[in-house]
Image: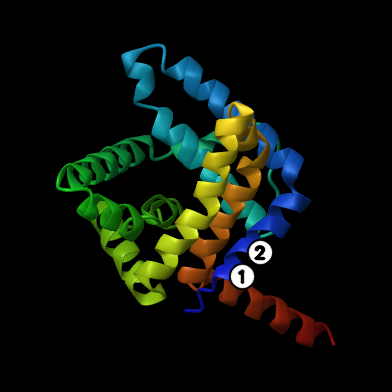
């Protein structure tokens, strides 16, 4: 594992810069789909699947795979039930943690930061294993490092939102999203594996 703040921030920034329009448009579509789905109670059940599909498209962008505008829902809806339960448990756990004098909530928020990415990336992984694996990855990377990363990518945007009527989030969310993806790739060692494959293919061609 080689989690470094600089790699997560700059790596995510560069991928977002190269795919800004695609990420922004797909994110806008996901927001619109969420608003429409939230009109009914039944529709709320599919909201986690919408964002799981969007997140899966970000992972494919990071890996250099083809992603089309508006075509990202399938991955989330293939396991919509699992994603709904996962997000429900994640939210309840963090809420209870914050209710217990805030500190436990902050700890769990960071420790479970990669739960959704893990489940999306490993469809065969159980929900409980996703929580456990996220805690393991955060512990190995360094809980405080991940905590600092979360602060760096969220606090400045939150402050900017206060002065721009949330315009900062609308403009910057592709960068924040890809920084999160890059952090996941680093803690899970999947960035290194892909980089090794690129090197191997280059050597083979030579």
Asked where in the image residue 86 lies, by quadrant, the reply is top left
Kind of element beneath mark 1 = helix
Q: Is residue 75 visible?
A: no
Q: Which residue is mark 1?
A: 7
Q: Position of residue 65 (x, y in %)?
A: 68, 55
Q: Position of residue 21 (x, y in %)?
A: 75, 39
Q: Residues within 10 Å of mark 2 (few under 14, many from 20)?
A: some
What's the mark number on residue 33?
none
Kindly report the distance in space between the C-alpha atoms of the residues bearing marks 1 and 2: 5 Å
| Residue that sits furthest to the front in the current view | 163
Q: Position of residue 152 (x, y in %)?
A: 52, 56
Q: Quadrant of the C terminus?
A: bottom right
**Apparent side of residue 184 relative to residue 160 in the rendered image (left or right):** left
Q: Position of residue 13 (x, y in %)?
A: 68, 56
Q: Residue at x 48, y 24 (%)?
A: 34
Q: Is residue 5 visible?
A: yes
Q: Which residue is mark 2?
A: 11
Q: Residue at x 65, y 42 (%)?
A: 172
**Apparent side of residue 41 relative to residue 17 in the rendered image (left or right):** left
**Apparent side of residue 23 relative to residue 32 in the rendered image (left or right):** right
Asked where in the image residue 71 lies, by quadrant, the reply is top right
Q: How is the image coloured?
A: rainbow
| Residue that sits furthest to the left in the current view | 100
Q: Residue at x 56, y 30 (%)?
A: 30
Asked where in the image residue 111 lies, by quadrant, the reply is bottom left
Total marks placed: 2
| Location of residue 199 with respect to 182 vertically, above or below | below
Kind of element beneath mark 2 = helix
Q: Residue at x 58, y 30 (%)?
A: 166
Q: Are marks 1 and 2 in contact (CB under 8 Å)?
A: yes
| Residue that sits furthest to the right in the current view | 206
């Amino acid at each position: 594992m080689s989690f470094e703040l600089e790699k997560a921030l700059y790596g995510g920034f560069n991928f977002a810069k190269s795919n800004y329009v695609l990420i922004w448009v797909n994110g806008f579509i996901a927001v619109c789909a969420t608003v429409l789905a939230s009109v009914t109670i039944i529709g709320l059940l599919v909201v986690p699947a919408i964002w799981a599909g969007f997140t899966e498209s970000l992972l494919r962008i990071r890996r250099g795979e083809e992603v089309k505008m508006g075509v990202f829902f399938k991955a989330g809806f293939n396991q919509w039930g699992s994603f709904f339960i996962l997000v429900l448990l994640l939210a309840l756990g963090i809420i209870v943690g914050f209710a217990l004098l805030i500190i436990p909530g902050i700890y769990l928020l960071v420790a479970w930061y990669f739960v959704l990415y893990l489940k999306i990336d490993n469809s065969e992984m159980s929900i409980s294993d996703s929580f456990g694996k996220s805690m393991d990855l955060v512990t190995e990377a360094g809980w405080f490092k991940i905590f600092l990363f979360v602060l760096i990518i969220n606090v400045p945007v939150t402050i900017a939102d206060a002065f721009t009527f949330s315009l900062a989030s609308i403009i910057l969310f592709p960068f924040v999203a890809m920084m999160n993806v890059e952090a996941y790739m680093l803690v899970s060692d999947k960035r290194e594996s892909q980089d090794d494959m690129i090197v191997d293919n280059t050597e083979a061609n030579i």
